[in-house]
Amino acid sequence: MVVVEVPGDIQTWTTTWRFEPDGACLQTVETESLAEGFPRTTERPCAFVARDFDVSISFIGGGTLVFEYSFADFSPDRLILDGFEYQRLA
């Protein structure tokens, strides 16, 4: 979760990634604004290719991002993606 302060508001952003063995992925971002008082969820389907220590993510409908990745303490359950740690969900 990331907390962002914008003029007149404070927002929390929670990002969840789902990576499938076939190269498909899904980015889900839940944004909650203190001013609005309710969450908004955005889902972006994508495809990914991991090479060396980079992963290239191409979003369906346009846009590509390249992130560095690693695993915290060499654990397959703790992905570090572009400096942010994500934990595997059951």
Image: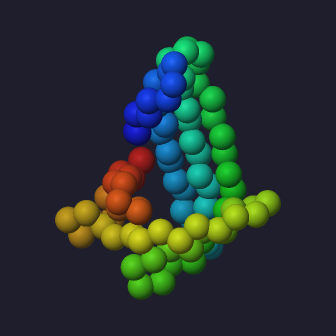
The number of discs equals 0
| Residue furthest to the left | 73
31 over 73 or under it: above or below: above
Q: In the image, what residue occupies the spot 50% across and 29% down? A: 6
| Residue furthest to the front | 7
Relative depth, front residue between 58 and 79 = 58
Q: In the image, what residue occupies the spot 56% across and 35% down? A: 30
Question: How far across and how far down the image is residue 62, in percent?
Answer: 76, 63
Horizontal side, residue 79 vs residue 35: left or right: left
12 over 15 or under it: above or below: above
Q: In the image, what residue occupies the spot 63% across and 34% down? A: 41
Question: How far across and how far down the image is residue 8, in percent?
Answer: 51, 19
Q: Is residue 21 visible?
A: no
Relative depth, front residue between 25 and 60 = 60
Relative depth, front residue between 78 and 57 = 57
| Residue furthest to the bottom | 52
Question: How far across and how far down the image is residue 34, in percent?
Answer: 50, 18
Q: In the rendered image, which quarter is residue 33 located in?
A: top right
- Colour theme: rainbow
- In which quadrant is the N terminus drawn? top left
Question: How far across and how far down the image is residue 9, in percent?
Answer: 50, 21
| Residue furthest to the right | 61
Q: Is residue 15 visible?
A: yes
Q: In the image, what residue occupies the spot 41% across and 62% down? A: 81
Horizontal side, residue 25 vs residue 68: left or right: right
